[in-house]
Amino acid sequence: MAKHKRDLKRERTWRRHIADQPGSGHTVRAYCETHRLRETSFYFWRAEIAKRDREARKTTAEGMLRDLSEVKVGDPVVHESHGIGRYLGLENLDFGDGETEFLTLEYTRGDKLYVPVSQLHLISRYSGGPPETAPLHDLGSGQWEKAKKKAAARVRDTAAELLNL
């Protein structure tokens, strides 16, 4: 709790610092010198704030499925860990503990992933273009991880450009 309050205080002082020095390319260095903070600590702190903000947005994001009525059979969906697949419907499977309901997702080469309904929070709508042209990923190929890293690098580059404005 104390760390969270300290981060909020730093965030307010950082925003004030930027407002006081518009157009300065050295705002990070000046801020760090003023507040006796190493630049590497500053970037780690900013990354931590950004991660917490992303986590908070995940639960309220437009793309997140709130319930199964929002997705139709054949719609492309995005699994947080496995990438883009096509929703095939619900299936009841019994693994010895009684029947459990699963979302069935199909990936390239007909590979299927069964996601328990209790993990619906890991699934979001595909929003990258027309649903019929959604590029399905290969399960276990590392293709999704590579795409996420590439997107993160683009975000980092854009953030760095914005800091230099």
Image (tube, rainbow, N blue to C red):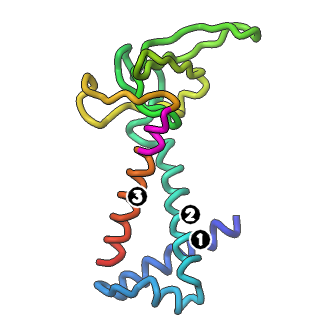
Quadrant containing the N terminus in the rendered view: bottom right
Q: CA distance from mark 1 to mark 3?
A: 24 Å
Residue appearing at x 40%, y 85% in the figure: 27
Q: Secondary structure at mark 2?
A: helix
Relative to residue 109, is residue 5 drawn left or right? right
Q: CA distance from mark 2 to mark 1?
A: 9 Å
Report the residue marked by disc 3: 153
Question: Residue 7 shows which numbered tag?
Answer: 1
Q: Is 144 included in the stretch rendered in magenta?
A: yes
Looking at marks 2 and 3 on the same chain, the residue that comes earlier in the sequence is marked by 2
Q: Is residue 161 magenta?
A: no
Q: Residue at x 44, y 35 (%)?
A: 64
Place of residue 44 in the rendered image (x, y in percent of width and height, measured from the top left): 56, 70
Q: Position of residue 67 (x, y in %)?
A: 48, 24
Image mark for residue 48 = 2
Q: CA distance from mark 2 to mark 3?
A: 16 Å
Disc 1 marks a residue whose amino acid type is: Asp
Going from the N terminus, do you reach mark 1 or mark 3 first? 1
The C terminus is located in which quarter? bottom left
The answer to whether marks 2 and 1 mark residues whose Cβ atoms lie closer than 8 Å is yes
Dot 3 falls on a residue whose secondary structure is helix
What amino acid type is highlighted by mark number 2? Glu
